[in-house]
Amino acid sequence: MDRQRISAIAHTDHPIAAPLGDDSVHTLLDRALPGGNPRLLDLGCGTGTWLMRAQSVRPHLRAEGVDNASETIAAAKRTVTEAGLGDRISFHHQDATEFTSPHLYDLVLSIGATHVFGGLLPTLEAAGRHLAPGGSILIGECFWEREPDQPTLDSGFTTEDYEDLATTVDHVMADGWTPVYGHVSTLQEWDDYEWSWTGTLSRWALDHPEHPDNGEALKAAAEHRDAWLHGYRGTLGFVTLLLRRTPHP
């Protein structure tokens, strides 16, 4: 059972693939999207949930999403077509690092997808190439709420994976970006996301006892739950930053 399939099932009931609640998503998009007819790009769009949510905030926007997961992009296209938004939201099945466009965008998103580009700053560099003058980037990334202890490291992390929040923001600013808004996910948002991820995958396995992937799905859910509850819960944080370019002096 490949990781993309596991992720697709696990995010069925929490389609925002990050520890963010609905109210937080709405607030972030409302702050990030300019008025009028903005053009939006999501690098690592998954099922296109951010684009659909953005359209509900700014009905006249035009949006594009990029992702290399074929099943995920196919599902996104179906959802948009069924909603009658195929003329306003489009998708590209390709590696986000290779995406090019004749357009520049008022807002570029990359939420929880910095691994695709090799880290936070490379993601900002890639997103910046698509940004219209005066545009904004909305980016979501993990950070250390506290120094990772051994159980956290045993769950698959290294201390070098992330920095603390202040250092993360310092790096962003030194790279030429100014935060104009931000949201740090609460423990409740984290817990809701993790219970949903592990619970949805477990429920799928229990509901499909004859499926050949049943045992692997249960194992993946149990391992994820164990890593969260016995490892990184309360240690791994998530921040979503709204950024604009810092003008040169």
Image: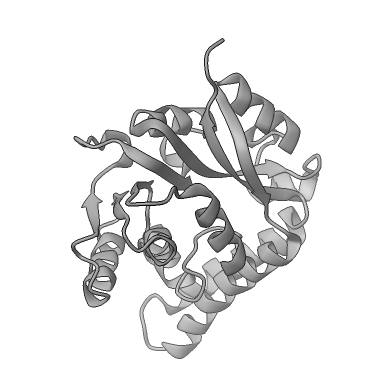
Between 133 and 22, the one nearer to me in the picture: 133
For residue 85, side relative to residue 4 (left or right): left
Whether residue 185 sits left or right of residue 45 in the image: it is right
Quadrant in which the C terminus appears: top right
- Which residue occupies the foreground of this view, 36 or 39? 36
Location of residue 149 (image quadrant): top right
Q: Residue at x 57, y 68 (%)?
A: 22
- Name the residue located 55 percent from the left edge and 69 percent from the top edge: 197
Q: Going by the picture, which residue comes out furthest to the front?
A: 36
Q: Where residue 27 appears, x then y in whole percent?
A: 58, 59
Q: Is residue 233 above or below residue 198?
A: above
Q: Residue furthest top?
A: 249
In the image, what residue occupies the spot 53% across and 66% down? 220
Q: Is residue 186 visible?
A: yes
Is residue 1 visible to the viewer in this orientation of the structure? no
Place of residue 124 in the rendered image (x, y in percent of width and height, measured from the top left): 47, 31
Question: Colour scheme in the image?
Answer: one colour
Q: Is residue 203 above or below residue 30?
A: below
Query: Picture coordinates of residue 129 (x, y %)?
Result: 35, 28
Q: Quadrant of the N terminus?
A: bottom left
Which residue corresponds to the image point at 26% horizontal and 37% vertical from the top-left?
A: 99
- Expressed as whole percent of the image width and height from the top left, the position of residue 76 reads 29, 65
Left or right: where does residue 111 sit relative to residue 56? right
Q: Is residue 60 left or right of residue 137?
A: left
Foreground: 155 or 51?
51
